[in-house]
Amino acid sequence: MMGHQEQLPQILVLGPPSVFKPYEHQFTKKFQILKPWESSLPTHLFLSTHGGSVEAVLTSGIFPVTANGVLNHLPALRLIVTTSAGLNHIDLPECRRRGISVANAAEIFSEDVADLGVGLLTDVMRRVSAGDGSNLKIDGSIPPKSSTPSKSSTKMDREKLSSPPQVLMLRPPPVFLRFQPQFSEKFQFLRAWESDLPLDAFLSNHAQHVQAMLTHGGGLPITADQVLRHLPSLRLIVTTSAGFNHIDLLECRRRGISVANAGTIFSEDAADMAVALFIDVHRRLSAADRCVRGANWPITRYYPLGSKVSGKRIGIVGLGSIGYEVAKRLDAFGCRISYNSRQEKPSVPYQFYSNVCELAANSDALIICCALTDETRHMINRKVMLALGKDGVIVNIARGALIDEKEMIKCLMNGEIAGAGLDVFEYEPNVPKELREMDNVVLTPHVAVFTDESFWDLFQLMVGNLEAFFSKKPLLTPVLDD
Amino acid sequence: MESIGVLMASPVNPYLEQELDKRFNLFRLWEYPSKPEFLKSHSQSIRAVVGGVSAGADAELIQALPKLEIVASFSVGLDKIDLPKCKEKGIKVTNTPDVLTEDVADLAIGLILATLRRICECDRYVRKGLWKKGDFQLTTKFSGKTVGIIGLGRIGMAIAKRAEAFRCPVSYYTRSEKSDCKYKYYPSVVELASNCQILVVACPLTGETRHIINREVIDALGPKGFLINIARGPHVDEPELVSALIEGRLGGAGLDVFENEPYVPEELFKLDNVVLLPHVGSGTIETRQAMADLVIGNLEAHFLNKPRLTPVI
């Protein structure tokens, strides 16, 4: 009943408070509701655009109601109703100055809060560690002040935590999806992607006391602006990837947040993948399999022959754990191994080149195994590819952005390099059409570590890191400064 | 030597043809309307046959070529040559060992990786644009799996060496245990199959080794086991293999050879746990040239009364 709707008084809802959703229908019967979180505009822009005649605001106990953030954009505002008892999130002097009344939840919560306080005190006194109220429901209730055990308590029984510690996830890493029941036995997961709230609102409302986060390489970038500033209690980020270019490490260091990654558990699978792609491109396995399945067994004597793998000169870009495993394997094929790394490694028997161009000039194939950083972005550029030469092959199992993809496609099309085996791409999962139509490339969908075995190992490692953190033990695979 | 008649049964390699053409009077069997026709006209001129994997020198052909002195095979396998008949008639035989050992071993490892890690299927997935719809599934790790090799000759040993670099424990079966060998020996193929996860066929095809991979062996390998064949198609009971794969009694197979090449059982085309290659074990530019040079070298040596390079008999 649109007409009726328009006659209802208009209120702007900020947060939203948890009481809003379950009773939205009843609210809508009485008020015309403005919902900034449903707009793609940032809140302050939404307020400027739509809040010109707003006289009343309903807010949660956490949404900051400040002059710059809110009040300046609502010239007609006369009332703020907060669903909390606490008022610290509202700039009261400013409201007074502007003649804005403020109403709160007064004492309606008092009994429940008192019950909670007693429950917490008892809880803490009877058990040892961690547990900052993680057994509470995540419904926007007033976060309890962290309780200190009463001075009169002397005994602390060493009991196993009866409620699992809380871990935040922005999006579900593939390993989580595979082992959901097992993970859920050990931790209570805060699942940001399941909420209708935009991320910052979700984090502001629900994750203020979260200490640990589980993320993955293909997930949202963990930056100060998007994520970290909404998580004041965060002390640990665990990523399911070996790479950590998606995490602002500097910012984490500044905030005292430890980071753990997948360490070297993927190194064998990733190395196997590199060798698989290397052999496939040279011996045209995928191309031949396509032929046979198309009922096209090549009976012509002009069927293209492959290129011998054994004895080729291999240039490994980045001789970390994965690069080293690749070298070991191809060594057994009689290949001659050289490498480029940030620093020469005197303990390995392979030839070092201080720059990638020189490495390429002395190799028949380049295998990219290094981390993506600001320095290494587009490190494999036209110059490097021309140095590699028209019989050269590139294999990339690291990160797509290490290669200037557009340039590589040109070089492949012009025969300036012979072929490529690629598990990663600049804009995954988008793979350029030109690549998908070429016969001399092998393309895989970022599966270098996608094996049953690695996922099981990864699951155990992630649990191990989280458990170590919550029991104040050293992390299993911390990302250290280097 | 331009007058010496050399018969080539199938068009295996342009470079080889070209070089044979330069030196001998080359007859290309496939250019004649029929074999009997050809034999009628030219059987008296043929002093050498160049064989390959699809056609060599069987008893019938040997019988039809009274002036035949030497069969030079463009392969290491001799299963297409009637060796007893050649011996009987004093006909020399050569093949192309060693030059293709590495290529075939490389392919065996490539096949293992492609099969276990589903590389070809991954490639199809990306090309079809399916990645945008979702991630690919998990596959099976290769490193550390037990590899069992049937036949530990040059090729078998080269495969073993490579598998070791992947941390794979290697075991083998041969007619008799090899002394001084660091790999674990099993006295039967079934026992080998029961104790490994990846079984590789790398032995010569003889009367004894035909269908060496039968139902019993396939069952022993099991639903988590993989069969890799870079030897000869008839080593495997192919209908048994196909039904095992379809029914999930075997985990997967990487096949470079088939019982009746170029025919490949069509049921295999829709399976995603197999890799199918058109007999490319030695199919590299470098190696085919080396093989061709060996064939030429052997023929020249023979006709110049010099010692042959790689004689079999």
Image (tube, coloured by chain):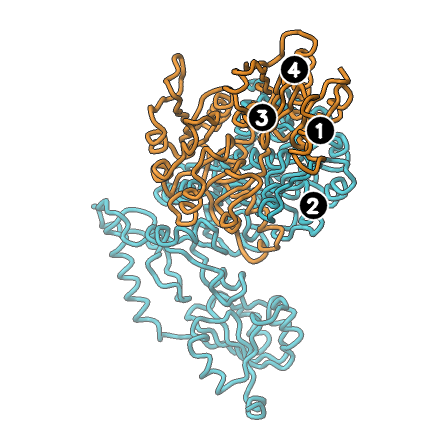
Eye-nearest disc, 2 or 3: 3
Disc number lying in front (3 or 1):
1
The mark closer to the camera, 2 or 4, is 4
Q: Which chain is orange?
A: B
Give me the chain that's cyan.
Answer: A
List the residue tagged with mark 4. B298
Precedes in sequence: disc 3 or disc 4: 3
Badge 1 marks a residue whose secondary structure is helix
User: For residue B41, which numbered disc appears in the image?
Assistant: 1
Q: Nearer the viewer, mark 1 or mark 2?
A: 1
Tell me the residue that label 3 is attached to: B57
Q: Residue furthest top?
A: B306
Q: Secondary structure at mark 4?
A: helix
Q: Nearer the viewer, residue A119 or B192?
A: B192
Element class at badge 2: loop
Q: Residue flagged by tag 3: what amino acid is it? A: Ala
Residue A56 sits in quarter: bottom right
The image quadrant of residue B238 is top left
Comparing labels 3 and 4, the label whose residue is closer to the camera: 3
Answer yes or no: do the residues labelled 1 and 2 have beta carbons within 8 Å?
A: no
Same chain for mark 2 and mark 4? The answer is: no
Subunit bearing disc 2: A
